[in-house]
Image: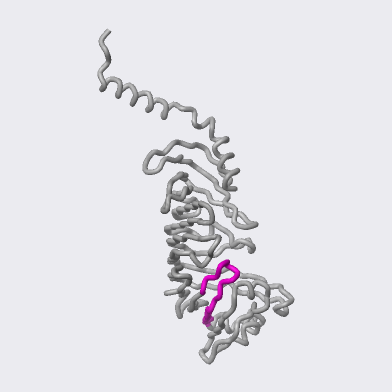
Amino acid sequence: MAKPTKSTVFLCLVVFFLGFILFFPIQNLKGMVFQKIFQSTGVLIVAEEIHPSFLGWPGIQIHNVNVTLPVGTDDIELASKMMTARARLSAFFIPSVSLSFSELKGGGDLFLKFGQRGATTLMALESEAFNLGQISIPGLGQSISGKLNADVDLKYNGALFSDTKGAIELKGSGIKTPPILVNNPMLGPPFQIPELEAGDLDVKMKFTDGVMSISSFKLGNPNTDLSGSITGDAKLGLTPEQTQINLTLRLIFSQKILGNPEYKTFLDFLGAYRTATAGEYAMNWTASVSEILNLTKALPTPVR
């Protein structure tokens, strides 16, 4: 019998691997795959189908998927037509996992990446026309309305927080905050923060050389219920709690809010921060994060 040629052997190998990929019962392993993901990341996945993906870094494509992401003591739930999960090597050869959501049922696309080696953690987030209404604010159980384009890329050092590097860019439109009832005896009688239409959001922040700097943090315009800005910077400490912030917040409310008697208690609470500009309130925080959290310097000082 004639010895097979190299091309014949190669063709047989190709056919074998294609057959293995196409007919391997990966659907039967779906439960085991999702269980491993949940055990290692805390991410809960429920989906109809999974398929291997070989474009770029190897991974799996998951169709008609519902994902529950743990955020502190709360969860964020997302439903998507398709999600791609990949394992990869990021910068500095740090192993990472990425999740890419296409055609979220609530609207928009979302990409998340997380990697860790030793004390170094890499985090990335990108979104396009992401509908904020499909997630709830952790701790409040309510959603902010609007669409968000985001580009976040951070390298965090858990052993030396001041070595954190990266950038945050956010572009929002149609932003509207929900009504919030504040009932804290330390802040006086209960009051209602009204639903506020803020419109556009523009945020640009950088972490470099031990400093967090804000080049832009603007919200709203003269025609919205609320407009405002944040200026200043923060000197990063050895830990997040040791970070020293120097931030000034300016808020301007429309006549619609100022003239509504239902919000008088809320506006009276802000009264100490009223400036000479009609409808404007301004405040400054100059303290460490630890001092703010333990309430020794929790309240800001007025800016005149």
Q: Is residue 191 above or below residue 121?
A: below
User: Where residue 167 appears, x then y in whole percent?
Assistant: 43, 65
Q: Is residue 13 above or below residue 171?
A: above
Side (left or right) of 264 relative to 4 = right
Q: Is residue 82 visible?
A: no
**244 in magenta:** yes
Q: Is residue 243 above or below residue 8?
A: below
Farthest residue toward the bottom? 276
Q: Is residue 235 visible?
A: yes
**Residue at 53 percent of width and 79 percent of height:** 246
Q: How is the image coloured?
A: one colour
Q: Quadrant of the N terminus?
A: top left
Q: Is residue 180 above or below residue 58?
A: below
Farthest residue toward the top? 1
User: Where residue 64 appears, x then y in whole percent?
Assistant: 50, 42
**Residue at 47 percent of width and 49 percent of height:** 96
Q: In terms of image quadrants, where is residue 239?
A: bottom right
Numbered range of the magenta stretch = 235-254
Farthest residue toward the right? 185
Q: Quadrant of the C terminus?
A: bottom right
Label tally: 0
Side (left or right) of 229 relative to 136 = left
**Residue at 57 percent of width and 35 percent of height:** 32
User: Where residue 252 appears, x then y in whole percent?
Assistant: 52, 82
